[in-house]
Image (tube, helix red, strand yellow):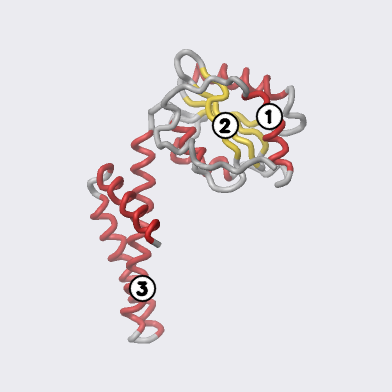
Amino acid sequence: MKERIERFVEAWKQLRQLDDKAMVWVVVGAFVGALVGAGLGLLIHPIAIVVFALLFAAMGAMMAFNLRLQKAQYAAIEGHIGAAAAVLNIMRGQWFVTPAVAVNAKQDLVHRVVGRPGIVLVGEGSPQRVKGLLAKEKKRLSRVAGEAPVTVLVVGDQDGQVPLNKLQRHLAKLPRELKKGDVPKLERKLKPLDRGMPIPKGIDPMAAANRKRPKPR
């Protein structure tokens, strides 16, 4: 419980630094939640009005807090080297993320993600240059990937690209092509390709790349 409170305090301090309107939105969230809770309580019993109002006010405040924090974090890292890697590394579920499997002198990057959709290569940087990196990496992987599908995408705001704040959602919506047990097997199969791979400094502006990732079994 103490650790949760400490994490919340740190997150709140971070949000206040990144978003000067955070307090206003949290209060608005609490107020709207209280109105909804009071309305529901009135339908059940007059005594329930206060209980429901307080409960929904807390829920509304937390929802507003989480949304503003996520938006502020995305805004803080967007445009920095390794922003896509940071977002990928905090995905929940059975995803194996390997940052910077391909990089050029201009620090355009390709990250590899292995999950139920198969292999996803995520490029970030100049669209013209990163397409070449993606093509080379896809060709390199095709020799050992077997029948696993390889999907390529570029992070950005141009047509045909995936915005950074929608990257996790985009991957989550990809068709499931592999069984759960096949995902770690595929990751193990690809790991030898990463030996001696140079990883540029500053790859993770959110310091998320060092989080614990699931180990292939």
Q: Residue visible at 49% across and 33% down?
A: 85
Image quarter of residue 57: bottom left
Q: In which quarter of the image is residue 34?
A: bottom left
Q: Mark 3 points at which residue?
A: 37
Q: Which amino acid does label 2 sit on?
A: Thr
Marks 3 and 1, the one that precedes in the sequence: 3
Q: Gap in Å between the C-alphas at discs 1 and 2?
A: 10 Å
Q: Circles 2 and 3: CB distance less than 8 Å? A: no
Q: Mark 2 points at which residue?
A: 98
Q: Which amino acid does label 1 sit on?
A: Leu
Q: Viewer-proximal residue, 161 or 90? A: 90
Compare residues 122 and 43 and report the one nearer the observer: 122
SS label for mark 2: strand
Q: Residue at x 65, y 33 (%)?
A: 119
Using a 10 Å C-alpha cutoff, classify the residue at mark 1 as few (fewer than 14 neighbours), some (14 to 19) or many (20 or more).
Answer: some
- Furthest-top residue in view? 105
Q: Nearer the viewer, mark 2 or mark 3?
A: 2
- On the image, the x and y values in percent for residue 20 come to 23, 46
> Which residue ends up furthest to the right in the rendered image?
147
**Screen quadrant of the C terminus:** top right
Mark drawn on residue 198: none
- Residue drawn 53% across and 42% down? 212
SS of the residue at dot 3?
helix
Q: Report whether 45 appears left or right of 84.
A: left
Counting from the top left corner in percent of width and height, residue 106 is at 45, 15
Mark 3 residue type: Gly
Numbered label attached to residue 190: 1
* Residue in the picture at 63% in, 31% down: 151
